Every structure is written in structure tokens, then in C-alpha cells.
Amino acid sequence: MLVVETVVRIRREHAGGKGIREIARDLRLSRKVVRKAINAPDVEIAGKPMRVKVAHMRLCASRAVYVRAYPRETQEIVFDAHARAFAVFGGVPLRGIYDNMKTAVTTVFVGKERVFNRRFLIMANHYMVEPTACSPAAGWEKGQVENQVQTIRGRFFQPPLKFASVEELNGWLEAECLRWAAMHPHPEQKDMTVAQVLEAERPALQPMLAPFDGFHETTHAVTGTCLISFDRNRYSVMAKAARCAVQVRAYADRIVVRMGDEVVAEDTRHFGRDRTIYDPWHYLPVLVHKPGALRNGAPFQDWVLPPALARLRRKLGSSDEADRRFVRVLAAISTDGLDAVEAAINEAFDTGAASDEVILNILPRRREPPPNQPLSVVVDLKLKHPPRADCAIYDTLKGEAVRGHNAAA
């Protein structure tokens, strides 16, 4: 709380016209003390301290809250927080009050005039929300959220939380927000809980038809080893994209790599540094020419194969010839698909002849269309209404022909 009170005093005195150096001198602040307080970890993830950025959203009428933790504050993360909050609230408000965060506001003018970020405005237009910015150092203009930041810190983050992953932490935070809303009375309508008022507020919210496709796109060059560098980590892409330019779309929890209109990689986003994330399936075309990489190549270390392929791998062994045979089966996945290859492997094992030749012989047979079934035709047919033959009708036609000839004469 000492840090919170100090920050509040700094904001108040700075708004009153004092400079930062003068405020620091009056409060006797040292750089070491401030740095230590700011770098204190908020949570413990997988046994390691981690400072998280927490997105806070609140509906003014019902007081329903939503909080979500992220490793950092970027624009795609702001987009993700909006989509998840609106999904939990069950609708979209007509107006949003925002702090002057860099992910939303490009330029701050005097008064209420702002230049909002172009991408942020696209998101606001998608949800049909009117964005309104607060005045600098005027926390009272968004008092509910300003108070919520301190309340949530004491309610959810004390004592420090410990989780195996950020996803697990966010699942717990969302459940706690819903539990708190179901248990606490509304500050004005005291005979109803926050959850009950939210239920009554939902008809006034706009329907959320589809979440905004919130990503940040950059262009990267793929190396000869099918890797791209993004956000201090390296990710593999399909071998066909080697030494080409690709577009990386970064979302809050994943990255999508595109080469033109084709997706050449999609992976979970990692926020650490100096990691290389391989997808062994990206390197199948490389294995065809270098089957020895199956045992020694970095992308294939600790590769968890599907059950049928793992069984075949154990059956063939680990010699150079076994590697070549196994790679021949793997190469068939590019044309027949993983499910078809696994089914062919299982069929080969069932017949007691699990080898690459047998499996590659089964696959084309499975591609052939099934033979046409002979149609069963009933010969002894009986008509419900048998036809009646009246040959005398042809005599009437002859009479009409004679009358027509006489008339012409």
C-alpha cells in the first residue's frame, strides 16, 4: 500500500503544477526504493516470479467487473481483453471511457480532444462503441475503474497468487469475478446482487455478433532453416516458405504466419526470450532428402508421434535403413493426410505385415472409389391400373383426314 499511496501523492501534486524532481525531493524518494517497489512480482507462474499487466473492465450500471492478466500491455492484448470481457458480460455497451493509454490514444490535446489510434478506432467501430478519453491525471472521471484497480489488487492478488500458467491464472480470475458478482449486493439496488443487476442490464447492451479480429501484423524474412524471429523468440514455418518474406499476425495468445493467402505456420505465442519453437511437421519435405535428420535434427528431438506412427517407428528400429523406410511413410502424409496413413498402418499391423511397402500399397487401394453395387431389378411387375387398348380411335383419325381433303378440293 505504501507504493500505491506514494503514486497517488505524486499524481496529485503533479496535477497541481509541481515538477517531478521537486516532488521526489519533497517525498525523499530514491531511485533504488522506487525500482525495488516497481519490480516486485505480482504472481508466481510455474515457480518463477512474474509481473503481469491486468486489464480491468467494468459496467457502470450493474458494477459487473472483468479482469484478465497478461505478460505485457500491447494493442493486440487490449483487443483480446475487450472480446473476452464482452463475452462474459453477454453484450457490448454503447460507450467506453478509457485512460490515455498508448495502445488507444496517439495524441493528447487540451481538454477532451484526442487522436485515437487507427486500429483502436477500427475495433471500436466493429463493436459500435463510442470511445471517450479521460483528462490526464483525472482519475475521478473514471472513478469506478480507478477504485477497482486498488480493490482488485487487495481482493484477488493478496497474498501473491501461484499458478502453473497464465491461462490457469486467468481461468481462476474469471471464476472469481463471477463468484464475486453472485455474492455481493449492488451498491444502489441493495436487494439485488451484482449478477442479478447484470442480468437485468443485458437487454440494454448491444449483441456481440463476432469478436474483433485483433492482431498486429509485421513482415519477416524466413531463414534457410525455416525459422522466423519474432518478439525475441524463433518459430518454425513450412519448408516451402524458406528464404521468403512472410506476414506475422500476432494475437494475444498465438501467432499466425502467412505467405500471401496461405497460412504456413500457427503456434502458441511465447512471451519469454531466446526460445526456438519447432513444429516437426514443417520439416517433412526436408526429411525426404535428409532422412538422417530424423534422429539428429533439432526439430525432431522429443517428437511425440501419433500412436500408430510411434508403433511403426518402434517396429522398424533406429538404423539408417529404418529411418529411410519410416520417412517414406511420413512423406505420404502430405498427399493422403495423417488419418489415412494411420489407418493404413493399423491395417498393416492387423495383417501381420507392417512395413513401408505394405503401407504404401494399402494407401492407393483406400483412395479408389468403392465398386458400384448391382441394382436389384424386380422383373415381375404388376400395374395398379393396366392400360386399355382401343384401336377404334385410329378410324376416327382416318375420317378426319378424308374431310380435310374434301374441304381443300
Image (spheres, helix red, strand yellow):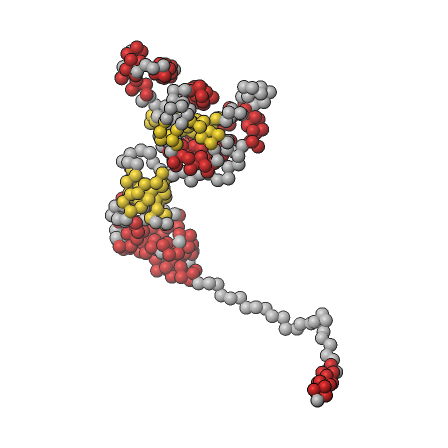
Is 286 situated above or below 146? below
**Left/right of residue 406 with respect to residue 320 in the rendered view:** right
Q: Residue 292's spot in the image, x, y percent?
A: 25, 51
Q: Nearer the viewer, residue 59 or 166?
A: 59
Q: Residue 247's spot in the image, x, y percent?
A: 33, 44
Is 42 situated above or below 400? above
**Left/right of residue 252 with respect to residue 193 in the rendered view:** left
Is 318 situated above or below 80? below
- Is residue 409 visible in the rendered image? The answer is yes
In what quadrant of the picture does the C terminus appear?
Answer: bottom right
- Is residue 287 visible in the rendered image? The answer is no
Tell me which residue sits at (39%, 56%) in the image: 336
Is 53 situated above or below 338? above
Q: Nearer the viewer, residue 117 or 52?
A: 117
Tell me which residue sits at (35%, 60%) in the image: 357
Tell me which residue sits at (29%, 37%) in the image: 233
In what quadrant of the picture does the N terminus appear?
Answer: top left
Residue at the front extreme, as displayed: 409
Name which quarter of the figure residue 102 lies in.
top left
Q: Residue 230's spot in the image, x, y percent?
A: 30, 39
Name which quarter of the figure residue 394 lies in.
bottom right
Residue at the bottom extreme, as displayed: 409
Q: Nearer the viewer, residue 347 or 275?
A: 275
**Left/right of residue 390 with respect to residue 36 in the rendered view:** right
Q: Residue 317's spot in the image, x, y percent?
A: 31, 51
